[in-house]
Structures are given as C-alpha cells and as structure tokens.
Amino acid sequence: MRIATIENEGSDASTGKIDIAPNRLLREEERPMERFDVCIVGSGLAGMSGAYEAARAGASVCLMGKGGVGKASATSMSAGIFTHPTEGLREEELFKATIDIGRNMNDERLVRILVTNGRTVPEFLSEVGITYETKPSGITLRRQRLMFPGVELAQLMKKVLADLGVVLFERCVTESLILERNRCIGTLNFDKNGNTFPIASHSTILATGGFCAVFGDHDNPSGLVGDGIAMGLRAGALARDLEFVQFFPIGMKQEGFPPFVLFPPYANGARIVNEKGDDVLRKRVPEETDLTRAVLLQRDKVCQAIAFEEDRGRKCYLDLSNATGWDKIDMETLNSMYQLKTYGFSPSDGKVRIRPTAHHSMGGLVIDECCQTEVIGLYAAGEVVGGLHGANRRGGNALTEAVVFGRIAGRIAAERAMGRQGTPSTRLLDDELTMKETDTTHLSKMRKAIGEVCTKSLGIVRSREGLVNGLEWVNRLRQEARSTSEVSMEDGKKDIENILVVVEGALNSALLRQESRGSHFRRDFPVEDERWLGHVEVSMSGSDLIYSFVSKKTLT
C-alpha cells in the first residue's frame, strides 16, 4: 500500500497522509480537480433522495452511479410499495411489527426514525412529481407506462436533480475512499473508459445498496455486490448483521418464461404447493395462510418452508388453478399477476414453477441517528446500512428507508460540509492509469464461482459444514484474485476483492451465530437462542476482518 500526501485547505498538511490504491502515481504539481460540498456514491433512491436534500440546502453536490442514474439500483426493480403510518396503521403498530418481524434484532433508534419520518414520504414524492395511490398501510406508486414504477421514479428524480444543479456522473465506479487520518475527504473513481479521477468533498455519502447480486440466484441489478460496505470497512467504519440475507419466496423458474419476481398482492385463491399438491403454507406456516400477507409479513418462514420441501426433492409451484377475478386483473391492481397474464398464462394452466431468490441484505454499515459512520465526514443510507431491519425485513419498509434516511444523510452532510472552512483541495492523483491486459473471462468465472459458493453456503438453510466449506473456497478465490492484474471496470479486480470481503464477513458472521433467527437458519442450531440476541460486528485491521459480538443488553 502506497502512502500519498494530500494537502487539505484549513488543515495541517504535514499530517495529511492517506491510503491510495497501488499503481496510482501523484503528479508533482497541483491541478484543478472536481470539488463538491457533498459527494454521493450510489444513484438509487437513497442516493437520489440525499442529493435532493443536500442540493436544496444549498450545497454543491455530485452523484456517482455505476449505470444510468437510478437504473442500476434496486429501486428500478421494485414494486413501488412504501409502508408508513396511516389512519389504518398507527405509528406504534408499525414500530412493533417491524421489531417483531426483525426478531428483536433491530436498532430501535433507527426504527423509530423510520416510522416517525415515514409520514413525510407522500409529500416528498408529490414534490418530485410522482403519482401514487393511498393504501391502508402506506402508498403504492402508480404504474402509468411500465410494470416497474421505480424506473419512472428514477427518471423523474434524475430531471429534478439536474434542475437543482446536481452533477451526475453516470457509468462511473468508485474504487476507494480518500482519507486524511479518520476523515473522509473524497473518492477515487473510474469513468466508463477505465480512466481514474478523484473527487474532493467535505462530506461523502455511501448509498451503494446491498450485496445480494453476489448470489448465483438473485433478483438484484448485477452491480449490487456490497462495494460500499467493503469501502466503508477499509476506511475504518463498522459493519453488522452481515449474516442476515432475505430471500424472496416467489421467483419465477418456469420453462418458457423469463426469470422475474412475482411481487404481492396475489390473486385471491393463490397458493404455494409442492409437486404432490400439498399446500406448503398450511403445512409449514399455519399461522398465516393468506399468500399476500405471508409474503409481506412472514417472508423468512415462507422461504424456509419452500427450502425444506426442495431439500426433500419436492419442487414447489405457485398454484393459480383456484384464483378468482383473473378477468379483472390489470397493471394497476395486481401487477405481478398482470405480468403472468401478458406472457399468456391463465389459471387454466394451473401451476408456475417457483424458487426463492436472494432479494435484500439486512446487514451493512453501522450509523448513528444522523447517518454518520465511525469515519468523520462519511455517511451512509439505504441498504448499505445494517441494523434497521434486524433479522428479517418487513415488506414495504425498504423504499421508505431509502427516502427517510437518504434525506437525513443529505441534509446533515450538507449542513456539516458548508460549516467547514475552506474549499476541498488535494494534490491530484495521476489521471493516467496503465491498464494491464488480462483474461477477463477468468474474472467472470471467478464471479460465477463466488455466486455458487454463496448459494450453497449462505442460502436459506445453512450449516457449519457448508459455511466452513464456503470460507475455504473464499480463501482460494482470494489467492486467485491477488494474482490477477488490474482490468477495466466492467470486469474489475476491485469488484472481486470487494465481493470477497463482504462474502467472507457474511460467512464468518453466520458461522459465529449459533442459532436460527429470522432469515438466518442453521440446520445444526435450529432454534432461536436469547443468548444470541445481539449483533455480530465486523471491523477491518489491515486486510483482516475482525469480529465481535455485541449483546443488545449492553446497548440498552
């Protein structure tokens, strides 16, 4: 690791040492560079909400996105459901439901912020021009032209941000955070041609999403691989709850149909059955046999029920043979059912082959009520954060989280940035990056191998043997990655390194947690154990991950 000196106005230049990536050279002269009050890494709903709030506060803001703004995020793939307190869902009721579904693992400070500020979501969406329908438990975005309303939301937000003067860096990858002691003062980035460029900022917000795309079978955009978590750990932030990964139970695996997730609500009479025709929910989740409610409120148990059936060689299906109201289904009311209808499926066809798919990672970086991490000037919001959802996420809370905490991070980051003296300034890293030729097919194979490891070892049903085998594979793959030269951002070595950091953290956290709780099910420890009511926290020392268990009793 090379050490470079960064001169930051208003600070002691003699102590301005920062870590930078190897093979990046410094120019002797200082040249003009991009400088902002707030730099936001990640262009999903959390990042866009943060940019909106920071720009309205008067800060200069840039937004970095791996793809087009909003398009390479989980927001674009969402069903557009926002849960928040309403007349029919009281604040305390939503608070308790979120804690209960999270199996008491939630950071209650964050849950309180979520439910209290959730009431502001409709007003925010109205401000940016998005239309929605009011529901008993919140709101749902209207599907005017597309089946995934998150795409329309992203398109509207992009225009709003441009009008506010936010600088959008699309198809750019952030490789690392630039540090001055324990303060984040910028980012090192790649553009779409593989050229590096640094950005200096007083405040940086990580809104890079979760890491479910590391699994072989997932419903996330391919870029959601936990890079924000890995960057945060390297910078000195803490992570927690990496063992908790939520799977979505109804992923389409029907021959002749494209793979996609069937979101609730479902047609009346819809059931999940095994190949013998047994009702899986009635058999294994008897407390909630209504499919829509079960998927929203008992998602972990529904996935485990399907996994237990599949382990016994019994394939599972979405049975629509007794579904009613099929002729009245449209894109507005039952969106996922409408998707099936557009592909020519009807109840007379009977059953659709389904299988759970990795959907949402509950673990991530540790933040306080202001979205501040352990690193000064570094904030985080959205799925990159851990602790809010506990061991299992309530359906409808993810988009609300993105808006609520994205706005808080943007506002606080802007206030603190504009309160600092001077303009962000650094001695520039060399823009010229010498790229070495390598076999990008090999890296793609490594990515596929990691996905297989995650699916086998970090899937719905886990065991000590599987987790240990997964860690052995990770160690072998890390040795391969270290011997591979740098490549372009599309198949970058850095992506592989980030993935391995997060996967190792998740595997070890799952191995340490010797119980079953929420989305974490251990075949060898199949019951919940109150001795494990607490968080497995992860930190980084050099290149090593350090683990500690923090009981919730010590936090109260």
Image: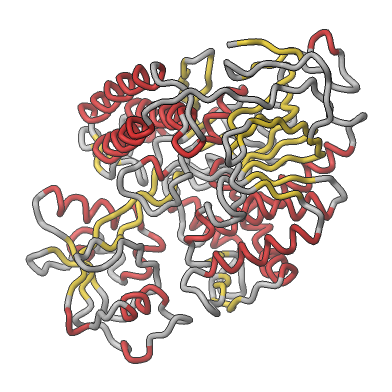
Image color mode: secondary structure
Q: Position of residue 180 (x, y in %)?
A: 74, 19
Position of 485 with respect to 145 (left or right) is: left
Residue 336 seen in the current view = yes
Q: Quadrant of residue 21?
A: top right
Tell me the quadrant of the picture where the N terminus can be found. top right
Q: Nearer the viewer, residue 490 or 127?
A: 490
Give the percent coordinates (x, y) of residue 274.
14, 63
Q: Residue 376 appears in which quarter of the rendering?
A: top right
- As displayed, is residue 475 above or below residue 134? above
Up-down: is 537 above or below 67? Answer: above
Relative horizontal placement of residue 249, taking residue 63 as reference (left or right): left
Give the vertical position of 452 relative to 482 (above or below): below
Numbered-mark total: 0
Relative side of 48 to 260, left or right: right
Q: Position of residue 382 (x, y in %)?
A: 58, 47
Up-down relation of residue 255 to residue 392 (above or below): below
- In the picture as drawn, the residue positioned furthest to the bottom comes out as 327
- Can residue 104 be seen in the rendering of this structure? no
Which quadrant: the C terminus? top right
Residue drawn at (26%, 68%) of the image: 257
- Residue 79 image position (x, y, % from top left): 48, 66
Q: In the image shown, does 311 or 155 lie closer to the viewer? A: 155
Front one among 141 and 483: 483
Task: Give the residue displayed 55% in from the left and 28% down from the top.
Answer: 554
Horizontal side of residue 424 vs 108, given as left or right: right
Question: Which residue corresponds to the image point at 56% horizontal and 50% vertical from the top-left?
Answer: 67
Q: Nearer the viewer, residue 325 or 171?
A: 171
